[in-house]
Image (spheres, rainbow, N blue to C red):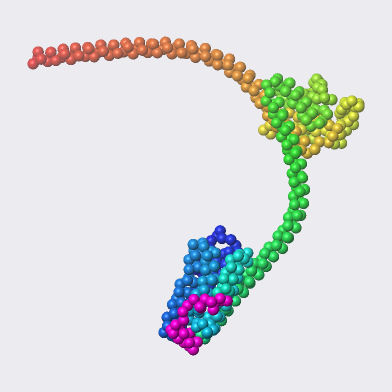
Amino acid sequence: MKFFNIGVSADLAEELAPKIRLTNQIALILTFNSLVYAFFSYTNHSENTVLYAALLCMALCILPVFFNFLNLYNLSRVFISTVPISLVVIVAAMITPPEKPALSSLILLTTSSLPLPFIIFHFSERTLQLGSLIFNILQIVTFRYISLLFVPSKETESLYTELQSLQLDTFGISFGVLVAIVMTSLLQKSMVDSEKKLKVNLEELEERTRAMEEAKSEMEKSYKELENARIDSQQREWINKGLAQSINLLRSDEDISILYDKLLAYIIRFMGANQGGLFLVNKQDHDEHMELVACYAYNRKKFIKKRIEVGEGLIGQSYLEKDKLFLTDVPEEYLDITSGLGHSNPRCIVIIPFFFNEKIEAILEIASFKVLQEHEITFLEKVGENIASVISSYRITSQTKKLLETSQQQAEMLRSQEEEMRQNMEEMQATQEEMYRKERQYVKHIEDLEEKLNATRKEQNHLTS
């Protein structure tokens, strides 16, 4: 019901929300019970003291709901747990003669309401819970002293006797028992809710324990993944560093042949390899071959010339198949690496075509004493794309330069022809202007003659007439 949720909001603490609902429920129950008590008081005796007290209690019991609406949660719960008992104690003190015991119905009403603080306060709210309970107990214990504050009269004594003799006291006892049952039920419900919540918390704890165990295994797995990721990151960083430095070389304005030498030397040293060669693909008049444009060996450049045909050796095979070759079982005497300790065969040979727009622009051959790793091959492929792009751009630039020179010559011829045509156009324009001027003169002359002819005709017609 919406009434029970008055004052409950989404940002309310988890343990406070059910207590606010209980406060609203108890307020409604006490209001209804006060109404019933007022009805029986009205129908069973003529005195209005109990009736007015019941009506006042009914009005006061609805106030906590209003306090909850204003978010005054502590005030509403303290009010509902103390004020109704205070009102019952005051009424009992007013109508009970000094030498007489309090009505059993009123005693039962007050004592049955004692569990209220335990119902509407969370165990963490010890101050409010114990404060309300102690205040209620003090009211009951000091009942005789409170009754001394009121002066007994014949009307109150008569009312006391009447309440004792009438069914109202029996109803009050029954009503008190009912209140006790309701309070016990609410307390039991609160305990059941707490047990359910505790059970849920235990299940959540077990679930969290299982989750922690799973998380532990996941963490171990993640640690391995992180270690692999760290290695991958280091390898990517190594690749990016090599690419960045190679791009700086490619951006230099040096002669292309010097650039080839520097690039190859940098790649060999950066990878810790020993020898290498860069072969440029040439296609001239149906003559397709690879030409060595740069080589590096034993930390120095060897100036040699070499031409490799398509399909010749490993380099020609790599070009023909358009795929890289990776050899760890290098044939004897395939290639010697010269070092300070003498001559020896390499442990690894890598031949990689450099592609740009799916076209091979160059082929790189590297020989090393160590077996190259996968990320090192990846670096060669990526740097090869950049080098192939520069080679393609250089070729396009060279062709463009030749075309530019040809176009400049043609443009010079066109400019000469254009100048000649411009002069002809100027002469033609002058001729046209002269013809236009003469035409206007002729037209003017004809118009003058027509005017004279018309005048002559008019004169002849006048003479004839």
Task: Residue 378 in the image: state x and y as whole percent.
Answer: 75, 36
Determine the residue positioned at 46% across, 81% down: 152
**Which quadrant of the structure image shows residue 179?**
bottom right
Residue 95, compared with residue 272, is above or below; it is below
**308, 344: nearer the viewer:** 344
**11, 391: nearer the viewer:** 11
Residue 207, compared with residue 304, is above or below; it is below
Task: Residue 238 in the image: state x and y as whole percent.
Answer: 75, 35
Task: Residue 292 in the image: state x and y as whole percent.
Answer: 77, 24
Quadrant where the C terminus sits is top left
Task: Residue 37 in the image: state x and y as whole percent.
Answer: 48, 80
Judge whether residue 145 is colored magenta: yes
Residue 337, compared with residue 188, is above or below; it is above
- Which stretch did the figure color magenta? 140-166
**214, 34: nearer the viewer:** 34
**Which quadrant of the structure image shows residue 142?**
bottom right
The mark tally for this picture is: 0
Residue 136 in view here: yes
Determine the residue positioned at 54% across, 79% down: 144
